[in-house]
Amino acid sequence: MNENVIREEIVGARNLGSFVLMLILFFAGIGFFLAGISSYFHKNFLIISDPTDIIFIPQGIAMLFYGTGAIGLAFYLFLTILWNIGSGYNEFSKLENLVRIIRLGFPGKNRTVFLSYEFKNIKNLKFLIKQGLNPRCNIILVLKDKREIPLFPAQFLMNPIETEKKAINLSNFLNVPLENLIL
């Protein structure tokens, strides 16, 4: 980082949480799927337990359904990790008076999401802290036309103290006011 450009790298789907969730869904899905198949054929396909005594309709078919769903979700997570969905960067340049927000999406014609705003269109920054069962902390770029663009992905839990320092530094860099929101 030099004094005229701030660039924040954003980690996308290639994070430890996504990888662990994918593995849990995959192995749990395989277990449920094999339990459902075992109840249908009355033959044990599982090492851990013996689900052959389970009645296929309705319990076995439900396990088959949940297993298939979990495997499907695990495959979806695998693809998002492979394609690194959500990764990119935020760049703030005093040289060009531009804010650039770049993210990767799903493969295709419009894979890269590119947002660019001039400094003069920025109204302020919001530092958001949401407490409760689903706590989160984020910095939001507020434009003069009242659009609000979060600068970091919502799924990452960020340290409120570090995020507040980052928001203050960014506010000073952009020369815009900083608004604190505690929900």
Image (cartoon, helix red, strand yellow):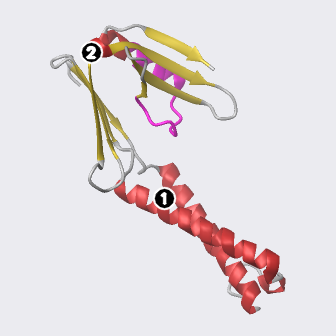
Q: Quadrant of residue 2?
A: top left
Q: Residue at x 71, y 80 (%)?
A: 36
Residue 93 rendering spot, x and y as whole percentages: 21, 21
Going from N to C along the chain, the mark reached first, 1 or 2, is 1
Q: Secondary structure under badge 1?
A: helix
Q: Quadrant of residue 59?
A: bottom right
Q: Residue at x 61, y 74 (%)?
A: 30
Residue 134 rendering spot, x and y as whole percentages: 64, 35
Q: Amino acid at mark 2?
A: Phe
Compared to residue 76, the image places residue 37 above or below, namely: below
Within 10 Å of the Cα at label 1, are there few (<14), some (14-19), or many (20+) other Cα atoms?
many
Compared to residue 151, the image places residue 40 above or below, namely: below
Residue 26 in sight? yes
Q: From mark 1 to mark 2, how far is it between C-alphas?
A: 36 Å
Residue 145 rendering spot, x and y as whole percentages: 38, 17
- The residue indicated by pointer 1 is 77
Residue 172, labelled with which disc? Answer: none
Pick the front one: 1 or 145: 145
Q: Which quarter shows the N terminus?
A: top left
Q: Which quarter shows the C terminus?
A: top right
- The residue indicated by pointer 2 is 119
Residue 153 rendering spot, x and y as whole percentages: 45, 37
Looking at the rendering, the stretch of residues picked out in magenta corresponds to: 151-169
